[in-house]
Structure formats: C-alpha cells, structure tokens
Amino acid sequence: MAKKIKKAELAQMQDFAKKLNNGQAQLGNLELQKHKLLHAIDVVERDFGVFQQNIKEIYGDISVNLETGEIKPNIVE
C-alpha cells in the first residue's frame, strides 16, 4: 500500500493549488483587459491625430482651449 499524506495536509495543499490557479487565471484576464485597453487607446490616438490634422488644415497651426474653444496661433520663434 502506498504511503499518503494526511487528509488535512492534502486538503491544505489542494487549497493552495486552487488559490494559485485562480490567481493565475485572474492575472491572465487582467492582461487581456490591458491588451484591449491599449488597443482602444491606440485607436483613439490615431483618430485624434487625424482630427487634429483636419483642424490644422481649416484653422492653421493653432492651440485650442479645451474648456472654451478659444483658439490662439502657435508662434514659432
């Protein structure tokens, strides 16, 4: 007959393994969410760049106050 550890020890070992597996699964889910968020940010940055270029073509090289919409020319020294 094979030797075995005590039932309480086995239960504790199984609990640790379960917690580790659960933590690893959660970490994997977080990495997936991170990847999706990074992609979404990339899309917004690209769209914003296109929008800024369109604004520059209409108004020239300007700065826009995002609260009031006031524009000021960018002065290159």
Image (spheres, rainbow, N blue to C red):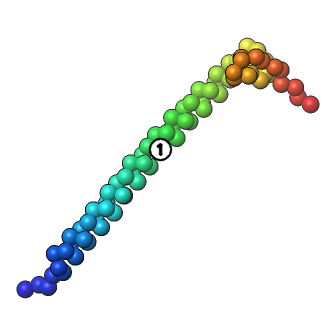
The image quadrant of residue 14 is: bottom left
Q: Quadrant of the N terminus?
A: bottom left
Query: Can you see residue 57?
Result: no
The residue lying at 68 percent from left, 18 percent from top is 54
Point out the residue furthest to the right here. 77
- Estimate the x, y position of residue 40 in percent, counting from the top left: 51, 35
Point out the residue furthest to the left here. 1
Q: Residues within 10 Å of mark 1 (few under 14, many from 20)?
A: few
The residue lying at 22 percent from left, 76 percent from top is 9
- Estimate the x, y position of residue 75 in percent, counting from the top left: 87, 26
The image quadrant of residue 3 is: bottom left
Query: Can you see residue 26?
Result: yes
- Estimate the x, y position of residue 42 in percent, counting from the top left: 56, 36
The residue lying at 37 percent from left, 52 percent from top is 26
Point out the residue furthest to the top here. 58
- Which residue in the structure is indicated by mark 1? 35
Closer to us: 36 or 14: 14
Q: In this view, does 43 lie above or below 67?
A: below
Question: What is the tally of numbered marks visible in this picture?
Answer: 1
Q: Left or right of 45: which side holds 53? A: right
Q: Quadrant of the C terminus?
A: top right
Assign a secondary structure to mark 1. helix
Q: What residue type is labelled 1?
A: His
Q: Left or right of 36: which side holds 24? A: left
Closer to us: 17 or 33: 17
The image quadrant of residue 70 is: top right
Q: Left or right of 30: which side holds 10? A: left
